[in-house]
Every structure is written in C-alpha cells, then in structure tokens.
Amino acid sequence: CGYGCSDHASWNQAGFRSAMAFESDQLEANTHIHSPEDTVATLDFNHMLEFSKLAVAFAYEVGNAKTS
C-alpha cells in the first residue's frame, strides 16, 4: 500500500517525529497477518516479547533524545 497507509504517516504529516518499527525485514513475513488466520493460535509469544523489549528501548531513547 506504500508509505501513507501506516499509522506513523499521519503523525509525520502533522509535524510529529515518528517511526514504524516492524518485526521482520519483509512486510509479508507473517503470512497470517490481516487474514482470517490472524488469530491467537498463530501468534509467536516469544517473538512478541523480544519485539516488545525493542519497542521499550526505542521509546526510552526517543524520550531522552536531545533536541537542538
């Protein structure tokens, strides 16, 4: 769909710094995402935990970034 369909795009357009963290190098890596098979049964909770750690670290870094 391109850049504009992600949540961070509208924040960027409104003048707020934003980023889109994604848990794989290809947006299609999870073959169940946005499909009828996108259920709790197809989730990888260990992967979610590791990605959550990354998200918290990212938020910490952005929150403590020095601006000029």
Image: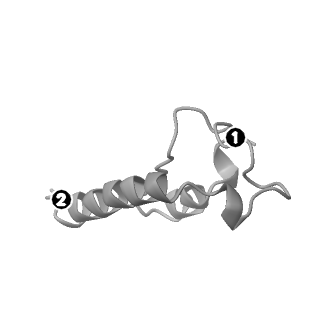
Tell me: residue 21, above or below residue 7.
above
Q: Secondary structure at mark 1?
A: loop
| Percent coordinates x, y for residue 40 in the rendering | 67, 66
Quadrant in which residue 53 is drawn: bottom left
Nearest the viewer among 21 and 40 is 40
The residue under label 1 is 2
Quadrant in which residue 58 is drawn: bottom left
Please tell me which residue is depicted at 67% across the width and 50% down the height of the picture.
Answer: 4
Amino acid under disc 1: Gly
Give the farthest residue toward the right.
Answer: 36
| Percent coordinates x, y for residue 23 in the rendering | 50, 46
Q: Is residue 45 left or right of residue 5?
A: left
Give the number of the disc on residue 62. Answer: none
Q: How is the image coloured?
A: one colour
Give the number of the disc on residue 65. Answer: 2
Please tell me which residue is depicted at 72% across the width and 52% down the height of the picture.
Answer: 33
